[in-house]
């Protein structure tokens, strides 16, 4: 980026700037005419000077310029015009004045729109360039970069720069020419009034900018303080677990309060200074009319200035202060924005960025194989103490290399250097005689994978994160429509990428698979190898079916549904599940589920918000159910307040009776009191709606308050049909209705399979249903299809909906699927525990067969699994052959996961399935038990080579 803001703007917007310049220059004559017309209206039409000496007509539309005596006098005719009467002249000149006002207004509108578009395009370019620069931060720079600071700079601090960009050249020219035109017009009318106006303008330009210098200094302090404040807030949020564990919230609040006081102090000083400047500026602007009235009036009385000229001068001066004020503001903004721009450029300085750009994507893609020579490698800590002292060694790739840690940071630093994740070292590294550090970024990204201690996941699905390494370029073009062509055009004008993420980005050729289905099967297989078979299956049960992507599953799930209910019937267990029936009320489902008989797809029909829906309330009113449901809600509220009074918020009863949250108890107590005192008719509309919402979650067998009888169920069933008709009249009904003959795309797989609700009044009903569901899924071989749905499970921000083991597994799979020439693993095994390291190393060794695997080892327990080992002695790296490999254990031997790991996975899994309820969970545990004898569980067993996808294993 150019260090000069104005050069940066001119370089990228020269054509647009010149076009607007031309329009501004062309508008000046029209602006001058609009200033001169008031003089003509007063002198010629109103005072009648055009009709002196008995003339009955006057010339209209004779465009001419009258010169003052000090410029030689006389006039210059431009258009001769035509003859009109006095009234016609008045109306004609007034209409002409209105015309030029409208024309000038339209020109200003066009100029402002053009400036705004120019500014937005330049801001889009600037933001993109800054984001592109952030992708090139060196690993060393990333240690000192706070994500919140970088985001604040790109989002907020660039905003005023973008707002100024459109005004950078155009504003001073437009305002300056307007002010000069008005001043010249005043000088033409009276040289003394013109000089007086010029003197006031000069004083404004001398005093106001000097007073605003302090504002600039304070503005810089505010920007730095705001950036640090945002960074500190981000640190506290990221470290919230430590804050809560150690109960240091009071200390953090005090620290943030101090920062807010610092910000307040700076901002208050800015406000005081700003309004002093504004007061002086307004004072000078308002003093000039006083001189005009006094001095101009004297000239008019003495005959040196006629009334029309005085009126025109005063009108022209009204046009002078606004552009002058805006020019002064522009100068202030220029200085302020230049400071912000300088700070932004310094933050993204070239010293902090990796050299090169995206053009490296077309660089030669040579495999990272052959001879590697390391000479005099040395890494120093911040105080100059060597962590790795002059080390030299040579090895040939591909190989399996273990780096044995000596307890210091040396092993991890060496691994990062080999993975090109660290440049802060001295010495040379050669790959086949060429500088290893000079490898283009694009080649490094394609050929090297690094799995560190912290697994970096992005919001999205499991599949998205595992395939992230294959999304380095757009694979296939998209046929653009009109909107897409407009986007591409704007992207080209602003230096943004023309690629679209709606296209196909997954590089199947690099992955070694022929289609997405085969790749999905490989991902599922890899997840199973890492012990996530049950997890991905459970996620699949909680996921939604997309008939377009999985038409076979959409068809077969209906068949599986029928088979499940047939099995329940055949085994005399039909009472375990009450099936959804369009003609029957399902007593195991909630009241609102029975009314909708489907799954809401619109937020307005979800939860308590449904009572605000007009169609819903009108159907209840027509069915005369509103008052009955409000009465039911009042009974529930009274019962709940009696039951929960005095209980802590975490009491189990709140989970059983999920009508009222603990925080709402006081509010419902007040509603109950009002209902007792005033009766139901005295309740407010809000009270009635809140009571109406309570019984919607009511399930008679579960809550057992005796509020639903057969008559009420019949009335609700009748209202179901009316509600469906009302909703289907809308363009978007907002509900995916249940249909026994087809899949419900808004319901999870488990609900589509069960198509009903479990009867909780039967002992062990859920366990029996799970077992039966698992058998059906296994018989119909639907496990893989369900697991494919599980690949669409959302991982949450930074993967927080997954456990540490799951995040580490996804990170390893991302590296394996990419098929790198060099895979470096540094601390990625930590979440798995010591017992599973050997199976993980075997898994990665098989997955990278024919390529290079580098693993940082915490101890020497597993060095025999490698071909070469690097040890550290006196801070020097020493390369040696690994000891002979012992006789390997049976690969099918089960290695139990630790109890803590199992518990963590189960807890995280429950949190990670927001759509999963307790009603229908057919088969995860039972299926896993049924399949245990046929397939080893990688979470507990060593790697099974047969389970490695062959196209990942070797090329």
Image (tube, grey):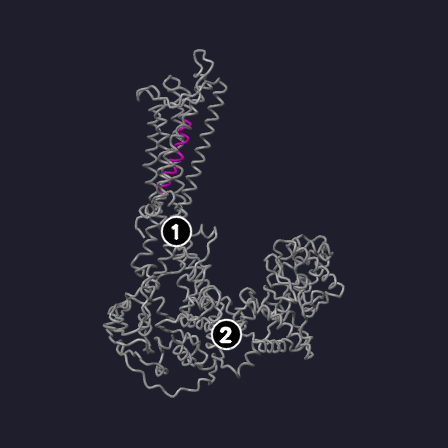
Residue at position x 41%, y 78% from top? 843
> Residue 320 lies in magenta, yes or no?
yes
Above-or-below relation of 884 to 489: below
* Percent of width and height locating residue 672: 68, 59
- The circle drawn on residue 714 is none
> Residue 692 lies in magenta, yes or no?
no
Above-or-below relation of 929 to 158: below
Check contact, mark 1 vs mark 2: CB within 8 A: no
* Percent of width and height locating residue 616: 67, 56
Report the quarter where the C terminus lies: bottom left
* Percent of width and height locating residue 658: 63, 66
Magenta region's main secondary structure?
Answer: helix
Which picture quadrant has residue 817? bottom left
- The circle drawn on residue 905 is 2
Question: Foreground residue, 151 or 98?
Answer: 98
Above-or-below relation of 860 to 744: below
Residue furthest bottom as drawn: 887
Residue at position x 46%, y 15% from top? 57
Please state if 192 lies on the left or on the right of 522 as rendered.
left
Q: Residues within 10 Å of mark 1 (few under 14, many from 20)?
A: few
Question: Foreground residue, 802 or 371?
Answer: 371
Q: Which residue is mark 1?
A: 492
User: Does the image show residue 247?
Assistant: no
Q: Earlier in the sequence, mark 1 or mark 2?
A: 1
Extent of the magenta region: 314-332
Between disc 1 and disc 2, the foreground one is 1
């Amino acid at each position: 980026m150019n260090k000069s803001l104005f050069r940066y703007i001119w370089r990228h917007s020269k054509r647009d700037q010149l076009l607007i310049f031309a329009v501004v220059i062309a508008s000046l004559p029209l602006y001058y005419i609009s200033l001169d017309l008031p003089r003509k209206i007063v002198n010629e039409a109103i005072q009648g000077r055009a009709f002196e000496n008995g003339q009955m007509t006057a010339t209209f539309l004779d465009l001419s310029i009258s010169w003052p005596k000090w410029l030689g006098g006389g006039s210059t005719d431009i258009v001769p015009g035509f003859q009109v009467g006095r009234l016609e002249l008045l109306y004609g000149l007034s209409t002409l004045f209105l015309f030029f006002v409208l024309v000038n207004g339209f020109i200003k509108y066009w100029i402002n729109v053009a400036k705004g578009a120019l500014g937005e395009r330049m801001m889009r370019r600037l933001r993109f360039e800054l984001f592109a620069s952030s992708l090139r931060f060196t690993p060393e720079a990333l240690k000192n970069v706070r994500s919140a600071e970088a985001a604040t700079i790109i989002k907020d601090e660039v905003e005023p720069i973008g707002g100024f960009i459109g005004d950078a050249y155009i504003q001073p020219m437009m305002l300056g020419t307007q002010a000069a035109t008005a001043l010249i017009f005043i000088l033409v009318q009276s040289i003394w009034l013109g000089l007086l106006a010029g003197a006031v303008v000069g004083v404004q330009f001398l005093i106001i900018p000097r007073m605003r210098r302090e504002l600039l200094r304070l503005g810089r302090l505010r920007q730095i303080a705001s950036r640090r404040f945002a960074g500190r807030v981000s640190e506290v949020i990221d470290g919230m677990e430590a804050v809560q564990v150690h109960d240091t919230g009071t200390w953090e609040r005090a620290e943030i309060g101090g920062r807010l006081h610092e910000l307040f102090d700076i901002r208050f000083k800015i406000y005081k200074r700003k309004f002093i400047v504004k007061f002086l500026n307004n004072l000078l602007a308002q003093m000039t009319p006083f001189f005009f009235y006094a001095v101009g009036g004297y000239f008019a009385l003495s005959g040196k200035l006629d009334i029309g000229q005085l009126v025109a001068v005063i009108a022209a001066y009204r046009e002078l202060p606004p552009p002058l004020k805006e020019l002064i503001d522009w100068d202030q903004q220029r200085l302020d924005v230049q400071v912000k721009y300088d700070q932004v450029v310094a933050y993204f300085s070239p010293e902090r960025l990796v050299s090169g750009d995206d053009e490296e994507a077309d660089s030669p893609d040579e495999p990272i194989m052959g001879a590697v020579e390391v000479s005099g490698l040395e890494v120093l800590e911040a105080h100059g103490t060597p962590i790795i002292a002059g080390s030299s060694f040579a090895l040939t790739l591909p190989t399996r290399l273990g780096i044995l840690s000596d307890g210091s940071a040396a092993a991890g630093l060496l691994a990062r250097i080999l993975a090109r994740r660290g440049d802060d070292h001295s010495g040379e590294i050669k790959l086949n005689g060429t500088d290893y550090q000079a490898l283009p970024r694009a080649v490094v990204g394609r050929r090297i994978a690094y799995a560190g201690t912290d697994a970096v996941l992005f919001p999205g699905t499991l599949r998205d994160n595992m395939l992230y390494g294959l999304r380095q370029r757009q694979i296939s073009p998209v046929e653009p429509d009109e909107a897409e062509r407009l986007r591409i055009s704007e992207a080209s004008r602003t230096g943004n990428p023309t690629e679209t993420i709606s296209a196909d980005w997954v590089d199947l050729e690099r992955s070694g698979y022929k289609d997405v289905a085969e790749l999905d099967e490989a991902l599922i297989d890899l997840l199973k190898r890492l012990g996530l078979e049950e997890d991905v299956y459970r996620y699949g049960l909680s996921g939604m079916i997309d008939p377009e992507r999985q038409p076979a599953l959409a068809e077969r799930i209906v068949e599986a549904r029928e088979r499940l209910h047939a099995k329940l019937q055949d085994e005399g267990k039909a009472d375990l599940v009450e099936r959804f029936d369009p003609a029957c009320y399902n007593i195991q489902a909630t009241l609102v589920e029975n009314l909708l008989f489907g799954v809401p797809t619109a937020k307005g029909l979800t939860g308590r918000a449904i009572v605000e829906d007009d169609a819903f309330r009108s159907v209840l009113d027509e069915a005369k159910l509103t008052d009955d449901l409000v009465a039911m809600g009042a009974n529930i509220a009274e019962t709940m307040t009696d039951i929960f009074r005095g209980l802590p918020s975490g009491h189990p009863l709140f989970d059983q009776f999920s009508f009222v949250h603990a925080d709402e108890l006081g509010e419902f107590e007040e509603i109950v009191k009002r209902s007792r005192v005033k009766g139901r008719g005295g309740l407010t509309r809000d009270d009635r709606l809140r009571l109406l919402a309570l019984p919607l979650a009511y399930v008679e067998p579960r809550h057992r308050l005796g509020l639903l009888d057969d008559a009420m169920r019949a009335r609700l069933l009748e209202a179901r049909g009316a509600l469906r008709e009302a909703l289907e009249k809308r363009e978007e009904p907002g509900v995916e209705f249940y249909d026994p003959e087809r899949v419900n795309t808004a319901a999870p797989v488990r609900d589509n399979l069960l198509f009903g609700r479990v009867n909780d009044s039967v002992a062990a009903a859920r366990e029996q249903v799970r077992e039966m569901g698992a058998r059906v899924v296994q018989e119909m071989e639907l496990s893989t299809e369900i697991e494919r749905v599980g690949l669409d499970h959302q991982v949450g921000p930074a993967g927080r909906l997954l456990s540490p083991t799951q995040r580490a597994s996804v990170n390893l799979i991302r590296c394996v699927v990419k098929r790198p020439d060099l895979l470096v693993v540094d601390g990625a095994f930590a979440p798995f525990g010591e017992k599973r390291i050997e199976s993980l190393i075997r898994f990665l060794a098989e997955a990278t067969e024919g390529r290079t695997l580098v693993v940082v080892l915490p101890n020497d327990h597993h060095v025999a699994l490698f071909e070469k080992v690097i040890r550290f002695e006196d801070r020097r790296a020493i390369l040696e052959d690994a000891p002979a490999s012992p006789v390997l254990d049976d690969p099918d031997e089960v290695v139990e996961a630790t109890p803590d790991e199992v518990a963590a996975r189960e807890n995280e899994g429950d949190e990670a399935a927001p759509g999963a309820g307790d009603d229908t969970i057919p088969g995860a545990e039972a299926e896993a038990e049924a399949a245990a004898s046929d397939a080893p569980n990688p979470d507990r067993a060593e790697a099974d080579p047969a389970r490695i996808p062959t196209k990942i294993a070797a090329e």
